[in-house]
Image (cartoon, grey):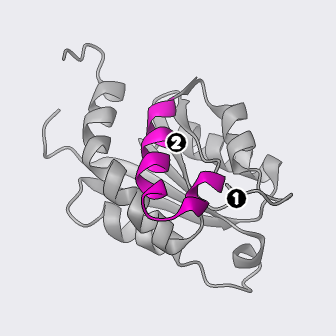
Amino acid sequence: MNNDTIFNAGIITISDSAALGRRIDKSGPIIKRELESGNNFKVLAYTLIPDEKLIIKTTLIEMAENLNLDLIFTTGGTGLSRRDLTPEATKEVIDKEIPGIAMALLVNNLNKTPFSMLSRGIAGLRKQSLIINLPGNPKAVEESLEIILPVLFHALEIIKSESFQH
C-alpha cells in the first residue's frame, strides 16, 4: 500500500437525544471533516443511534462485515451514566482489543482536563475493521483525533496487509 491508498470509514454517533432529533450531533461531523481533510479516508457510512447495547452491537457488526469498512469511529456513550454502554457493546463484537489507542487518548487528554479519566472508550478489531470509541464531547473528539490520526494510516496498512514487515 502507498500514501495514495484511500481507506473507507464509518461514524456512529451514540446518543439518545441526537437519535431522537432533540440535539444536533456536533461530534460526528467533526470526525467526518477531519478524516476527509487530506487524511486518506472516505466516510461511507454515518449514523445516529440511541444508547442501546443491541443497536450499538448490530451497527458495529453491519459496518465491519457488510460494509467492509476499514475504520469505524463511535462517538458518545463512553462515560459513567447508566445509559453509557458503548465500550461494553464494542467489547462484545471485537476479536482483538488494542489498549494502546485508549491509553494514548487518556494520557494526552489528561493533560487537558482531569475529567478525561472518566472516559471508558476502547479500541479493537473486528475482522479487518479498526473500531475506536471516542467521547461524545466535540472538543474531546478534536483532541483525540489530533493524537490518533497520525498513526491510523500505518495501523490500517498493517491490518490490511497479509505480509507486512516492519
Q: Nearer the viewer, residue 41 or 44?
A: 41
Question: Which residue lies at the image location 71% right of the left edge and 68% below the top edge?
Answer: 15
Where in the figure is residue 142, as x and y percent of width and height? 40, 67
Image quadrant where residue 112 sits: bottom left
Question: Which residue lies at the image location 51% right of the left edge and 69% below the top edge?
Answer: 28
Asked whether residue 68 appears in the rendered view, the answer is: no
Q: Which residues are magenta?
A: 98-118
Image quadrant where residue 16 sits: bottom right
Crowd rating for badge 2 (residues with CA inside 10 Å; few <14, some 14–19, many 20+)? many
Query: Magenta stretch containing residue 96, yes or no?
Result: no
Q: Is residue 84 above or below residue 64?
A: below
Query: Which is in the foreground here, disc 1 or disc 2?
Result: 1
Secondary structure under tag 1 reads loop
Q: Quadrant of the C terminus?
A: top left
Where in the figure is residue 105, as x and y percent of width and height? 45, 49
Q: Is residue 60 above or below residue 114?
A: above
The Cα–Cα distance between marks 1 and 2, rounded to whole angstroms, is 14 Å
Question: Which residue lies at the image location 50% right of the left edge and 73% below the top edge?
Answer: 138
Query: Magenta stretch containing residue 116, yes or no?
Result: yes
Crowd rating for badge 1 (residues with CA inside 10 Å; few <14, some 14–19, many 20+)? many
Q: Is residue 44 left or right of residue 13?
A: left
Question: Which residue lies at the image location 34% right of the left edge and 52% below the top edge?
Answer: 147
Where in the figure is residue 80, as x and y percent of width and height? 76, 56
Q: Is residue 149 left or right of residue 144?
A: left
Image quadrant where residue 70 sits: top left
Instruction: Determine which residue is flagged by label 2.
Output: 131
Instruction: Determine which residue is flagged by label 1.
Output: 77
Q: Quadrant of the N terminus?
A: top left
Q: Is residue 166 above or below residue 83?
A: above
Q: Amino acid at mark 1?
A: Gly
Q: Which of the two labelled residues, at mark 1 and mark 2, occupies the earlier sequence position?
A: 1
